[in-house]
Amino acid sequence: AQVHTAYSAVTGHPARFVQNAIANAADTVWQTIEDGANVYVCGDGRRMAPAVREALAAIYRQRTGADDETAQQWLAQLEADERYQQDVFA
């Protein structure tokens, strides 16, 4: 297993936010999801969770050439399959 970290308070860290860590590791994230990985997101539901969803949708669009509606359907299917789960707070 690999861990990709994000630290908002560490000066100079390559990933300040979770969505940055996802974007920085886009190839790995895509391949692991394609290989059947589950995605668990825990934290701020107001800013972080939507930004993570957008980062994942962007990876999907980049890898498939799909539009945003199709990317959102892909995310919805990951949720329906219980492969994308969130534990977020407002």
Image (cartoon, rainbow, N blue to C red):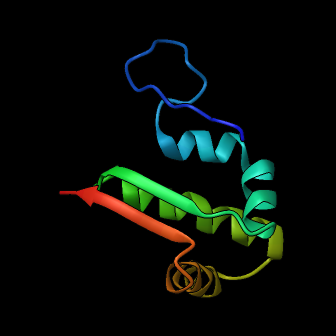
Give me the residue at 69% from left, 63% from top.
Answer: 37
Give me the residue at 52% from left, 69% from top.
Answer: 84
| 10 horizontally vs 21: left or right | left
Report x, y in % for residue 79. 50, 79
Q: Is residue 37 above or below residue 22?
A: below
Q: Outermost residue toward the front?
A: 1
Q: Nearer the viewer, residue 10 or 84?
A: 84
Q: In terms of image quadrants, where is residue 56?
A: bottom right
Q: Nearer the viewer, residue 1 or 33?
A: 1
Report x, y in % for residue 86. 39, 63
Q: Outermost residue toward the top?
A: 11
Q: Outermost residue toward the left?
A: 90
Q: Is residue 12 above or below residue 20?
A: above
Quadrant position of the C terminus in the picture:
bottom left
Quadrant position of the N terminus in the picture:
top right
| 36 horizontally vs 11: left or right | right
Q: Nearer the viewer, residue 10 or 89?
A: 89
| 28 horizontally vs 90: left or right | right
Give me the residue at 70% from left, 62% from top.
Answer: 59
Q: Is residue 9 above or below residue 51?
A: above
Number of numbered discs: 0
Q: Is residue 16 above or below residue 86?
A: above
Give me the residue at 80% from left, 77% from top.
Answer: 65
Report x, y in % for residue 83. 57, 72
Q: In terms of image quadrants, where is residue 13?
A: top right
| 9 horizontally vs 45: left or right | right
